[in-house]
Amino acid sequence: MKFSGGVVTLTYLSQVISDNPTIDDFWSLERCVSLAARSEPQGQGSPLMFDVEPEFRTTPRKWDLILTAAYERGMRAR
């Protein structure tokens, strides 16, 4: 959750995908998720919300765990 002027906002996977139209496979998405976490304001510990499922041929079975780990790595790298 991001706090923006007292309003709580969340980071959605669909927003990460729409903000990066050049994503062409799951592993590119993983990198973009990590970058999105790094761009979060310092001190905000918002989780990544999975409102869509990635529809790439390269999407692994446990895609949600992989993207969660990438997001958390990005949060730690800030």
Image: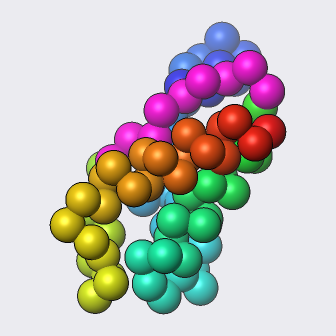
Residue 23 appears in view: yes
Query: What residue lies at 66% left-to-right and 46% top-to-bottom?
Result: 74
Given residues 37 and 77, the one toward you in this image is 77
Q: Is residue 16 above or below residue 68?
A: below
Residue 52 appears in view: no
Taking the image as shown, residue 30 lies to the left or right of residue 76, namely left
Query: What residue lies at 60% left-to-right and 73% top-to-bottom?
Result: 20
Instruction: Pick the quarter of the image with the N terminus.
Output: top right
Taking the image as shown, residue 51 lies to the left or right of residue 71, namely left
Return the x and y of residue 36 as percentages of the image width and height: 65, 52
Q: Main secondary structure of the magenta part?
A: loop
Given residues 48 and 69, the one toward you in this image is 69
Given residues 55 and 73, the one toward you in this image is 73
- Judged from this view, the residue extending furthest toward the top is 6
Q: Is residue 33 above or below residue 71?
A: below
Query: What residue lies at 66% left-to-right and 38% top-to-bottom?
Result: 75
Return the x and y of residue 24 as percentages of the image width and height: 48, 88
Q: Is residue 46 magenta?
A: yes
Return the x and y of residue 44 as percentages of the image width and height: 67, 23
Q: Is residue 25 magenta?
A: no
Query: What residue lies at 60% left-to-right and 24% top-to-bottom?
Result: 45
Instruction: Pick the quarter of the image with the C terminus.
Output: top right
Return the x and y of residue 9 as percentages of the image width and height: 54, 29
Taking the image as shown, residue 63 lies to the left or right of residue 42, namely left
Q: How many marks?
A: 0
Q: Is residue 73 above or below residue 57?
A: above
Q: Which residues are magenta?
A: 42-50
- Snapshot colouring: rainbow
